[in-house]
Amino acid sequence: MNILPSLLIVGVTAICTLITRVAPFLLFGNKNRTIPQAVIYIGEVLPPAVMAALLIYCVKDISCIRYSLWVNEIIGVIITALIHLKWRNTLLSIGVGTVVYMVLIQSAFFS
Amino acid sequence: MSSRAIIKQALLRTIPVMMGYLVLGIAFGLLLQKAGYHWVWALGISLFVFAGSMQFVLVGLLVQQAPLTTVAVTTLLVNSRHLFYGLSFIERFKKMGKRGLYMIFALTDETYALLCAAGEVGSTEDRDNLAWWMALLNQSYWVIGSTLGALLGSYITFNITGIEFAMTALFTVIVVEQWLNSKNHLPSIVGFVCATIALIWLGPAQFLLPALIVTVLMLLIMRNVVEPSR
């Protein structure tokens, strides 16, 4: 762990998060200003696109060289998604998915 | 309403968020501790960043010591949805003075949902007091959960290898929810495809920033295709 670079990373994250929260008040706080259509469009389509990209970021370290290097992640994601489709309970889906993944990894089930 | 009655209302209404924030907070704390960070980092990050899904991404960025431009662009895009939460509350938060400033900072997905669901609560003053208490309680749950997770991390004796999958599971749930809640699935597909191609092309250490930029550009280019089918 490098303290100064880590502090910078956390600081930039904090400031940029704050910017996204303050921006609507600074940009559109004036009553007479209407919100451009393009902004509304991006606001609707960006979150699902970014979240799908981040799901790929989560599994970025998998590798196709050996099937033991990706099969646990794929099973974990599929089980999490199926449980969520069935019950739509966030904590349940995350809990079961994570436990299944941990059991697969720790028991070296696919290796 | 007396302030006791308001605090009681706020506690009752935030119970579901408490469950979620404590559990996810603990998971975040554990991950950060596992990445080699003292619990003070978990406390500080949850106090000053306070953005659930972004904090999980932040652990990854810290581990790979990502360049600050990647950190900035990723944060702005991951949190871009905040822009649209804020839009619904511009007039209301402005009238709340100093408390309004905190409301702007603390407007998470869950707090936003609670505010939207709050409905009619007596006078405007009561309504704003309740909103403030709910926001404050929600952040307390998150801060307590993440600090606890980081503290527990150093004492856990059983094998927690694989716990990092909690983040993947969280994003899986978010993607499924967004898929179910939108009629148009093109944005999800665009993000998925752009990120996959970028990962294969550029590798795990380099792909995130280009993937996000190309995703935004694609959405802008495809506006005519994406919009009419809504």
Image: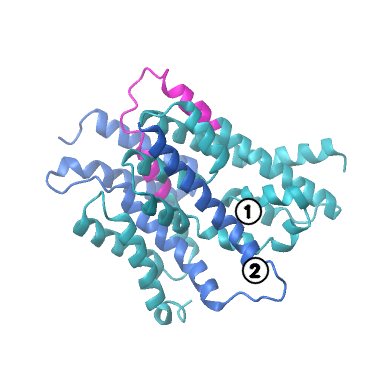
Residue B105: x %, y % from top left: 62, 49
Residue B154 lies in the magenta stretch: yes
Q: Quadrant of residue B30?
A: top left
According to the picture, the residue beneath numbered tag 1 turns out to be B112
Q: Amino acid at mark 1?
A: Tyr
Q: Is residue B5 above or below residue A65?
A: above
Report how far apart the C-alphas of labels 2 and 1 lie in the structure: 18 Å
Give SS at disc 2.
Answer: helix
Residue A28 is marked as 2
Q: Is residue B158 left or right of residue B142?
A: left
Q: Amino acid at mark 2?
A: Phe
Q: Residue at x 27, y 44 (%)?
A: A73
Residue A25 is marked as none
Residue A97: x %, y % from top left: 37, 40
Q: Quadrant of residue A5?
A: top left
Residue B142 appears anywhere in the view: yes
Dot 1 alpha-carbon crowd within 10 angstroms: few under 14, some 14 to 19, many 20 or more: many
Q: Is residue B33 left or right of residue B82?
A: left
Q: Quadrant of residue A109?
A: top left
Residue A57 lies in the magenta stretch: no
Q: Residue at x 37, y 58 (%)?
A: A52
> Which residue occupies the extreme left position in the image?
A65
Label 2 chain ID: A
In the rendered image of the structure, the colour used to display chain A is: blue
The quarter of the image holding the C terminus of chain A is top left
User: Chain drawn cyan, letter?
Assistant: B
Give SS at disc 1.
Answer: helix
Residue span colored magenta: B145-171
Dot 2 alpha-carbon crowd within 10 angstroms: few under 14, some 14 to 19, many 20 or more: some
